[in-house]
């Protein structure tokens, strides 16, 4: 086996499984907004995961954590948000404050 082939083989054996393992760890969590409600209302995630907010309603919503952050959710659109830090927060829609949920990022 030539040196080039050997290093290629090492890359496949050593690096590829690591890359696959890391990709498998970060998840995308779908949260659907339909008929003025978040679903699910309790979201459990890990740092590095992504939330895909899917707004099926014909009106704009937000996912707002008071004093922290806000994601605008345009009508009939999806928005992704990468979770960068650990937190346990209540979120709501600024325009329809009765729309609520809880997000826990570990
Ligand atoms: Cu709303």
Image (cartoon, grey):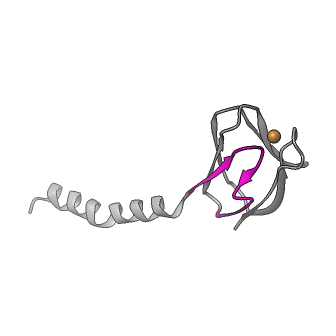
Where residue 56 appears, as percent x and y from the top left, is: 66, 39
Where residue 21 appears, as percent x and y from the top left, is: 43, 65
Q: Which residues are magenta?
A: 28-46
Quadrant location, the C terminus:
bottom right
Q: Is residue 41 above or below residue 106?
A: above
Residue name at image x 79 percent, y 40 percent:
62
Residue name at image x 22 percent, y 59 percent:
7
Quadrant of the rendered image holding ligand 1: top right
Residue name at image x 76 percent, y 33 percent:
60
Left or right, 40 with respect to 64, comes to: left
Q: Is residue 78 above or below residue 50?
A: above
106 part of magenta stretch: no
Where residue 92 appears, as percent x and y from the top left, is: 84, 49
Residue 61 falls in which quadrant of the image? top right
Left or right, 24 with respect to 52, comes to: left
Main structural element of the magenta stretch: helix, strand or loop? strand
């Amino acid at each position: 086996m030539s040196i080039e082939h050997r290093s290629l083989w090492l890359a496949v054996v050593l690096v590829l499984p690591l890359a696959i393992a890391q990709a498998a760890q970060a998840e995308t969590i779908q949260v659907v907004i339909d008929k003025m409600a978040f679903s699910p209302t309790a979201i459990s995630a890990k740092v590095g995961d992504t939330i895909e907010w899917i707004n099926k309603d014909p009106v704009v919503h937000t996912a707002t954590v008071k004093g922290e952050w806000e994601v605008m959710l345009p009508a009939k659109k999806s928005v992704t948000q990468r979770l960068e830090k650990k937190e346990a927060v209540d979120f709501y829609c600024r325009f329809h404050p009765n729309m609520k949920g809880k997000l826990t990022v570990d």
